[in-house]
Image (cartoon, coloured by chain):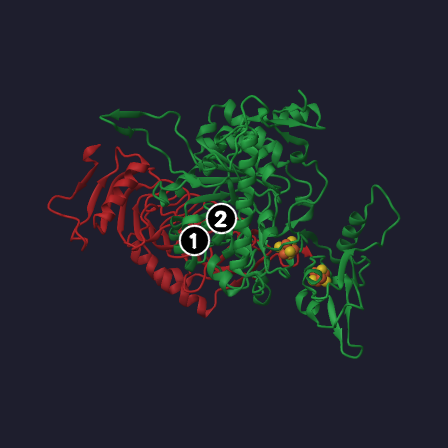
Amino acid sequence: MRSFVFPEFSIIRDEERCGSCRGCERQCAFGVHTYDPVTDRLTSDEQKCAGCQRCAIFCPEKAIVVRPSPSFYRPNASWSREKIEDLKRQAETGGVLLTGCGSDKPFRIYWDHIVLNASQVTNPSIDPLREPMELRTFLGRKPDMLDIRAEDGDVEIRTEISPNLTVETPILFSAMSYGAISYNAFRSLATAACRSGTYFNTGEGGLPREMRDEFGRCAIVQVASGRFGIDAEYLNCAQAVEIKVGQGAKPGIGGHLPGEKVSLAVAETRMIPQGTDAISPAPHHDIYSIEDLSTLITALKEVTNYEKPISVKIAAVHNFAAIASGIVRAGADIIAIDGLRGGTGAAPKAIRDNVGIPTELAISSLDRRLREEGIRNQCSIIAAGGIRCSSDVVKAIALGADAVYIGSAALIAMGCTLCQKCYTGKCNWGICTQDPRLSGRLNVEIASTRLSNLISAWSHEIREMLGGMGINALESLRGNRDHLRGVGLYEWELDVLGIKGAGE
Amino acid sequence: MAKAFVLEPGVRAGPSGGMGAAVIDAASLETRELNDRLRELMLSGARRVQISNVCGQRYIGTRLYTPERLKMEIEVLGTAGNDLAAFLSGHKITVHGNAQDGVGNTMDSGEVIVRGRAGDVLGFSMRGGEIYIRDGCGYRAALHMKEYQGKRPVLVVGGGCQDFLGEYMAGGVVIVLDLEGEIHDASFIGTGMHGGVIYLRGTVEGSQVGDQVDISPAEEADMEVLEVYVSRFLERFPEVETTKEEILASPFTRLTPRSKRPYGGLYAY
Ligand code: SF4
Ligand code: SF4
């Protein structure tokens, strides 16, 4: 059937500069560029372009510009070009629209409406280059009180302390599974996490056996509804186990890793036959209630000999705070809350762009709810979904999070341009693909250095911002909404965030 | 409570496992205490353990993973609680009584024998080992069972099963013998199935089975598989008063997935 959809991008090749090296032809897995031996020129099929900018960045002559195509339909506030074209695509295929990455829709980004405080005159600011600044964070259940006895100079803590994760900086890598991302991307995250004193999350695709000894010490392993790649060794080699109930990009639905992406190595790690769809059902079929969740949490504590904190990851949706309270009471040591803008390798567009609530509001209501119920100490909160920079991290913590997960930000550090075509398996940046020719483009040493650089740059900025507020430990910022003010927000938004308006 | 953990008179649990079994009286033990004892016994070298007076304690067998893959044989007297043998790694557990929900949840390897019935979500996401249930089981059995390489889980149920049997099943073998003479009245069998095989003694209607499933009579190769597991079933339950020949004389229905990719055509690429 002839497609009635415009190409999304225009490709402009500066013929003067182009030396016909055919580099772009090799770079583009979508098959956009082809060499014509008769004219010794390259031509481009714009219809196939994902706008990933690989060719433009790698062209040695800087001869290519890829930009949004200027074609338009008659302007119409209701029928945007995107709405018209999505509809046409569905009329042509009869299928559910898939997409990758977090929602790109213009929901209010609260980070950009919150400003931070700084010290002036009284309570002087602290210079992080001179003074120690504590970013180290402990994630897990904290006791209600500590029974400490001191005898003859010996201090003894009588209270049984639950296992906690120690992170040197409050930034962890979010769940991204081997299968959704390439081996090299997965390994780069693991390498950088170990190097930077933080953790990577395996996602639901298992942890390759040969990585367990080396990277288990900085791994959080996931147990999702598909239960892929799970055995007792996998659970025990990591430092924490996370039950994935929901994901911000697709709350309430499961996932299908298409058979094409289930290569031999992916199949081995997931422990499923090669080439089958790896189906994660929408719910865990052994969890239909808080009591069932509690059973699974305890089963995971049992299998890991009560040595690891258990995290439960949920998507931020209406009334989630009440559910989260149940999750804490069910025994979770950490709650990971993933908001509306959380990323994904593949999600139905209708779900990604319409279901869930923004992370910022979610953090605040969760923190408040748990405080009101007097159980905030029983779990740590990791906030995820739409964290783009160090000030987002600082704001998240001041709103009540203990730490954050970054996903898209980490991928961007490795080269991702948020082209949203992850589900095609043809990622030209070698990240979301199982094609060895493409994944080979991602060098683990370089990519992990880029990730570690990001963590250290953000950590330094966080210290600067803390120092500016006259705070020398992240602990003193946690839930400290007094350091936040809103700009351009409605009353109800300030209320949910629990912050005052600027100038108040 | 101090007496709860006693070795049988004259028998020491040595590295060889000794002649007899170590004994745990579970009467006054909470789940966690019972599993503490079990793990201690395993680490101290016991290879056979009998647990008496079990009354709903959960996760029996779950906390027995060691990097050295120590293995034990465990006899459970009483009713095993939820998640018996969850994540089980190589041990053999026999329950002389019934088992509650979640038997063999995400089980990796080993064997579970229940001389009674099992509750809901039996063999959920199991990927290796064998489970034999003498009587029937509840809803959602064999959900998302899977196999890979040499690992092929097997679940044999002597009685009947309820709705959602084999939903999302991705591998392994499920055999339902229905010896109690119940007819298969379960529905939604094999919905979303994309691997593995289910054998039902007797027949089912198309309306009881998911769209993703092919229904056919068991063929010769299938009968060979059935012969192996029916024999094993009868060996484990000598109290079942029937013979292999008698069981195999009935027609068997085979359920297999239509495709490894049930949802391949769902999306607009
Ligand atoms: S998909 Fe990427 S590499 Fe291919 S033409 Fe478009 S921008 Fe260039
Ligand atoms: S990971 Fe690759 S395919 Fe996905 S958005 Fe980034 S560049 Fe595009």
Residue extending farthest right: A74
Residues under numbered marks 2 and 1 in contact, where contact means CB atoms less than 8 Å apart:
yes
Q: Position of residue A296 (x, y in %)?
A: 43, 41
Q: In what quadrant of the picture does the N terminus of chain A appear?
A: bottom right
Chain letter for red, please: B
Q: Is residue B1 above or below residue A225?
A: above
Q: Is residue A491 left or right of residue A13?
A: left
Q: Along the polypeptide, which appears first: circle 2 or circle 1? A: 2
Instruction: Give the labeled residue for mark 1.
Output: A215
Q: Residue at x 30, y 50 (%)?
A: B93
Q: Is residue A179 left or right of residue A218?
A: right
Spatial CA distance of label 2 from label 1 is 9 Å
Residue extending farthest bottom: A38
Instruction: Give the labeled residue for mark 2.
Output: A200
Q: Position of residue A489 (x, y in %)?
A: 70, 28
- Which amino acid type is shown beneath numbered disc 2? Phe
Q: Colour of chain A?
A: green
Q: Quadrant of ligand 2?
A: bottom right
Q: Is residue A67 left or right of residue A255?
A: right
Q: Position of residue A244 (x, y in %)?
A: 51, 44
- Which amino acid type is shown beneath numbered disc 1? Phe
